Image (spheres, rainbow, N blue to C red):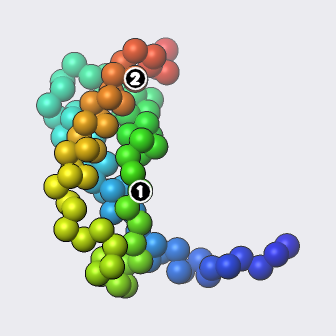
Amino acid sequence: MARKWYDDDELDILINRNHEMVLDAVEAYLEEKPDFCRCRDCRLDLAAITLNRAPGRYYVSEYHMKYYGEGDEGPDDRRVRRIVNEAAAVVTRRPHHD
Ligand SMILES: [Zn+2]
């Protein structure tokens, strides 16, 4: 097998800043929308669809975001909230639960 280009512990410092932002946005959505289904399938589908649609904002954490995307917190936050709403519509239209 070919040697990997990275050591496993190196991946730990490769962070997607929008990953946590998406999880927070899903939580906020669920708090705001009590009618949205709370089952495991729907909650995880909501997160998965949102994560797929949200832009990645990866950075190498030991650089402390100095060179990557610092200062654009606001636009991404609004964008992610909009994406959660769109993802929720998809899940509601075609839920995987029984
Ligand atoms: Zn459900």
**Residue 9 x/y as whole percent:** 54, 80
Residue drawn at 41 percent across, 66 percent down = 58
Check disc 1 and report the residue beneath it.
Answer: 56
Q: Is residue 9 left or right of 80 when viewed as pictured?
A: right
Looking at the image, can residue 44 be seen? no
Quarter of the image that includes the N terminus:
bottom right
Check disc 2 and report the residue beneath it.
Answer: 90
Crowding around mark 2 (Cα neighbors within 10 Å: few <14, some 14 to 19, many 20+) is: some
Q: Disc 1 marks which amino acid?
A: Gly
Crowding around mark 1 (Cα neighbors within 10 Å: few <14, some 14 to 19, many 20+) is: few
| Kind of element beneath mark 2 | helix
Compute the Cα span from label 1 to label 2: 21 Å
Of 69 and 90, nearer the camera is: 69
**Residue 75 x/y as whole percent:** 20, 52
First reached walking from the N terminus: tag 1 or tag 2: 1
Residue drawn at 82 percent across, 75 percent down = 2
Q: Looking at the image, is mark 1 or mark 2 nearer the viewer? A: 1
**Residue 62 x/y as whole percent:** 37, 85
